[in-house]
């Protein structure tokens, strides 16, 4: 709208590139405080991710199109809008005086008030993710200017502002009169990657079955890891310790190598397993990701937190460890795949404020489906 208004003032019926440059210069140059950051960090993060798996061959069986096509079309529309705004910003940079660009490059902005909180640099919520539209705000702290929305907010007030300037004796020939309240910034919703942490009871006679189903579920979930931006970790507890066998990863090859030939049998240090799972989840959360615990056990511990045998003390320590997980607010699912599930597993889920599933005949595919259903909002265990 502003470019067309500038063209009309110049006696042209349509806006040309010179109108875009002039409009961007008048809007952005007086408010310039820094150059746009280069996208180097985002490129480095993309390079660190593993390449996507090969796409399956297309078939002409007449199946309905995948639901992801709608998301792709939305992404394409957003990409086109972003490209248009990037063109406008590039035009603005080209039209800004050279001495101002040099000052910005050196960090000597003409005016800068207040101190940066650093929140934008940590979260980068204003830089990428799912577009949520624009809102009033200043383009600083990692927030990007929504140029089109800014111009759209300013144009309806031009006549009023010109009359005010004339009444104050400050009439000028500026094509667009901008104010702070006109500024709009882009909003994005960034989905943090999810890390599903399996804590598997590898003790007793059911150890082989639990480990087999857990390994199968891990491999199935990692098969979809690139699409869902998720990672998987695995903790096994048996004897008198708990061990992190697989740190958070989305590499299927690494997972298979780490999970091959896992030992089983011995006592059940349930408290140690829960504590190790909580510590792993807290480490994940500290890195800005979402942690989700999946605990495969019947809930019957016989080794306490000090690695000593004794059911009474082991039960107390396990309950304390479970309540610590619940107090931390970590999403938790307790799965009992023993032939005859008892109440201990459900009680453990209650203490963790989590969910409980009894799957006495579960295979890896069933376990994976149950985990995904629970992570999308299945009812929690009764408190």
Image (cartoon, rainbow, N blue to C red):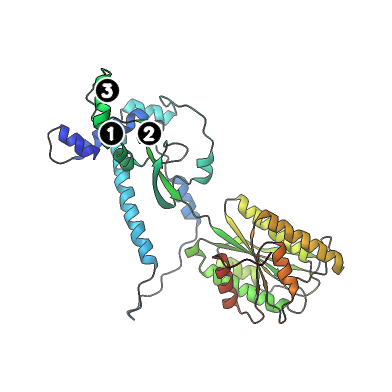
Give the residue pinned by disc 1. 157
In the rendered image, the residue lying farthest to the top is: 169
Q: Using the image as rendered, state which of residue 41 and residue 236 is in the foreground.
A: 236
Whether residue 367 is visible: yes
Instruction: Please tell me whether mark 3 sits on a helix, a strand or a loop.
Output: helix
The crowding category of the residue bearing disc 2, from other C-alpha atoms within 10 Å (few below 14, some 14 to 19, many at least 20), is: few
- Residue 30 relative to residue 224: left or right: left
Q: Using the image as rendered, state which of residue 315 and residue 256 is in the foreground.
A: 315
**How far, Cα to Cα, is label 1 from label 3?**
12 Å
Residue at (32% x, 28% y) in the render: 98
Image vertical order of residue 307 relative to residue 214, above or below:
above
Residue at (78% x, 59% y) in the render: 320
**How far, Cα to Cα, is label 2 from label 3?**
17 Å
The tally of labels here is 3
Image quadrant where residue 348 sits:
bottom right
- Residue 226 relative to residue 146: left or right: right
The x, y position of residue 175, in whole percent, is 23, 30
Image quadrant where residue 238 sits:
bottom right
The x, y position of residue 145, in whole percent, is 38, 40
- Residue 137 relative to residue 352: left or right: left
> Which is more N-terminal, label 3 or label 1?
1
> Which is more N-terminal, label 1 or label 2?
1
Numbered label attached to residue 165: 3
Residue at (51% x, 41% y) in the render: 121
The x, y position of residue 185, in whole percent, is 40, 41
- Residue 298 relative to residue 183: left or right: right
The crowding category of the residue bearing disc 3, from other C-alpha atoms within 10 Å (few below 14, some 14 to 19, many at least 20), is: some
Q: Quadrant of the C terminus?
A: bottom right
Numbered label attached to residue 181: 2
**How far, Cα to Cα, is label 2 from label 1?**
11 Å
């Amino acid at each position: 709208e502003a470019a067309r208004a500038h063209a009309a003032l110049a006696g042209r019926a349509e806006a040309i590139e010179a109108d875009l440059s002039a409009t961007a210069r008048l809007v952005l140059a007086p408010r310039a405080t820094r150059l746009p950051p280069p996208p180097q960090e985002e490129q480095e993060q993309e390079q660190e991710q593993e390449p996507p798996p090969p796409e399956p061959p297309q078939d002409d069986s007449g199946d309905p199109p995948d639901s992801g096509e709608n998301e792709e079309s939305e992404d394409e529309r957003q990409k086109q809008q972003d490209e248009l705004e990037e063109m406008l910003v590039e035009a603005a940079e080209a039209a800004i005086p050279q001495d101002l660009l040099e000052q910005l490059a050196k960090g000597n902005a003409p005016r800068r008030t207040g101190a940066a909180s650093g929140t934008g640099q940590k979260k980068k919520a204003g830089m990428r993710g799912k577009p949520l539209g624009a809102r009033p705000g200043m383009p600083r702290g990692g927030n990007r200017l929504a140029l089109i929305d800014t111009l759209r907010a300013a144009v309806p007030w031009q006549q009023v502002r010109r009359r005010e300037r004339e009444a104050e004796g400050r009439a000028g020939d500026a094509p667009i009169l901008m104010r702070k309240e006109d500024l709009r910034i882009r909003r994005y919703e960034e989905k943090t990657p999810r890390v599903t942490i399996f804590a598997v009871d590898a003790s007793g006679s059911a150890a082989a079955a639990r480990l087999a189903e857990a390994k199968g579920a891990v491999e199935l979930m990692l098969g979809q890891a690139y699409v869902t931006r998720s990672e998987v970790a695995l903790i096994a507890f048996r004897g008198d310790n708990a061990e992190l066998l697989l740190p958070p990863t989305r590499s299927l090859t690494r997972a298979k190598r780490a999970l091959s030939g896992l030992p089983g049998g011995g006592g059940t240090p349930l408290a140690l397993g829960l504590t190790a799972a909580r510590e792993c989840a807290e480490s994940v959360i500290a890195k800005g990701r979402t942690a989700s615990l999946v605990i495969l056990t019947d809930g019957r511990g016989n080794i306490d937190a000090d690695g000593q045998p004794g059911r009474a003390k082991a039960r107390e320590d396990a309950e304390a460890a479970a309540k610590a997980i619940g107090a931390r607010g970590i999403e938790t699912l307790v799965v009992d795949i023993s032939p005859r599930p008892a109440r201990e597993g459900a009680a453990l889920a209650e203490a963790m404020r989590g969910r409980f599933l009894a799957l006495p005949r579960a295979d890896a595919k069933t376990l994976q489906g149950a985990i995904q259903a629970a992570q999308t909002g299945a009812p929690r265990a009764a408190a």
